[in-house]
Amino acid sequence: MKFRRSERLIDMTNYLLDHPRQLVPLTFFAERYESAKSSISEDLAIVKETFEQQGIGTLQTVPGAAGGVKFLVQISEEKARPFVKELCDLIATPDRLLPGGYLYLTDILGDPQIVQKAGRIIASAYSEAKIDVVMTVATKGIPLAYAVASQLNAPVVIVRRDSKVTEGPTVSINYVSGSTKRIQTMVLSKRSLTEGSRVLIVDDFMKAGGTVIGMISLLEEFNGTVAGIAVLVEAEKIEERLVDNYLSLVQLSDVDLKEKKINVKEGNFFTLNQ
Amino acid sequence: MKFRRSERLIDMTNYLLDHPRQLVPLTFFAERYESAKSSISEDLAIVKETFEQQGIGTLQTVPGAAGGVKFLVQISEEKARPFVKELCDLIATPDRLLPGGYLYLTDILGDPQIVQKAGRIIASAYSEAKIDVVMTVATKGIPLAYAVASQLNAPVVIVRRDSKVTEGPTVSINYVSGSTKRIQTMVLSKRSLTEGSRVLIVDDFMKAGGTVIGMISLLEEFNGTVAGIAVLVEAEKIEERLVDNYLSLVQLSDVDLKEKKINVKEGNFFTLNQ
């Protein structure tokens, strides 16, 4: 069946959005739509232009016989900033404060739309980086890790606090929690991480960073390297931050448990990711 | 800025895919693209036709002043069946068998592409149903639950085995595991589920169904109703299945631990979801 241009553009858009960071040969589209490669090239130019204009992402063209086109998510600052602002307002409601200075984020993390948008923004910072795997720790970081990983065409590896029969053989490490100074355990299925992987660590919340340090020690057991660290929310006024290079979308400040007040501001994402 | 039709179609496709089950007024698009409503209607007709032809989904038109258009995911059987077949082949590798007849699925559940496709297929069965919330239990069911929920425009609620400080006040129940007959506990944050919600239960794996029964008891504590039950993989030859109405994409049969053999076939999805 031959496709009209309008149909090709719609299906192509869907296909490309669905296959981020995957090289799609022009012949694939030419055969799919029974169209000349020259028409496909014209189509792709329109898609690229619209994606860029609308702050969705871009298409990268790889020339040559083994070439093709690759969709990279790149949410524009113009689109990302208002979303982060909304997120800040959402987090700033006083009834989120829980005993111990923890924050109730379950409703926010339970909203797939919010998580997907946050994931796309974070993924934008790594869309051209070499990432083999996205790593997170059970449970709260999982949805965000998937949202990021799906945009980077990378698998997700989930670190656990305890080992389960369905994981097969595991590797475990002990680490010291940054804020409570307690010794804790982390476990990762042996099969789940390939030796020497480049790992992007994603989590929902970071206080001193002990959990992230734990994940780093764990991935070192697999001879992995840290390709990046990104969190949705970071707590502020940490005297001794254990982690240096990380991105955050939102930063807490002046958490006042007595007065039930939190100030919430933009994280370091827009400053660092230029 | 005025948009050409080709640009409108690309951006519209992205927007609609990103906002499933949300009513978008025609005026929204008319203003976004500075175009006449009649042009928008023509665009939407082309999008609808292409989505249907390509087995992506459909657009539902709601007439009247408060009307608009809604994208519903509806993966065609033609597209879903080959995917499920591939999934079966992937699961049928003998080295997945773990002690106790459990199956190593971590790599499959760790692949966002697979999880998203499975999620879209499951969501297709409920795209016109009234679903307020998708419920799952930590940890393995979480990615699939999000994949389903994101297509149904519903939040995800995660049941845990133990309560955590970051959850605030919780409700807990005890239930009997279907296969091991052990008493276990499930916990849900009080704030996370609104009274009287219609709940779609999603999980990665079902043996006798004890976990699902546990989730049902728990949601009854919130006066919720079960709107559906869907699992990725169901174990076969369960003498006493505790749950009756459920959808499964994949079914195991003849798991032979000694010979390290598993037979894997299509679940009941295509039979029940006609």
Image: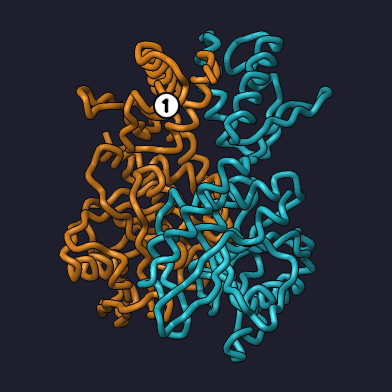
Chain colours: A orange, B cyan
Q: Which residue is mark 1?
A: A55
Q: Quadrant of residue A46?
A: top left
Above/below status of A213 relative to A246: below
Residue with the most extreme front position: B259
Q: Residue at x 67, y 77 (%)?
A: B214
- The kind of secondary structure element at disc 1 is loop
Above/below status of B62 relative to B36: below
Quadrant holding the C terminus of chain A: top left
Task: Give the image location of residue B55, x and y in percent.
Answer: 60, 35
Task: Give the image location of residue B248, x and y in percent.
Answer: 62, 62
Q: Residue at x 24, y 26 (%)?
A: A62
Q: Is residue A141 visible?
A: no
Q: Is residue B271 left or right of residue A224?
A: right
Q: Residue at x 44, y 65 (%)?
A: B92
Q: Amino acid at mark 1?
A: Gly
Quadrant holding the N terminus of chain A: top right
Task: Give the image location of residue B155, x and y in percent.
Answer: 62, 53
Task: Give the image location of residue B210, x and y in percent.
Answer: 64, 79
Q: Quadrant of residue B272?
A: bottom right
- Chain letter belonging to callout 1: A
- Residue nearer the viewer, B74 or B238: B238
Q: Is residue B141 visible?
A: yes
Above/below status of A186 relative to A246: below
Q: Residue at x 46, y 32 (%)?
A: A15
Q: Is residue A126 left or right of residue B11?
A: left
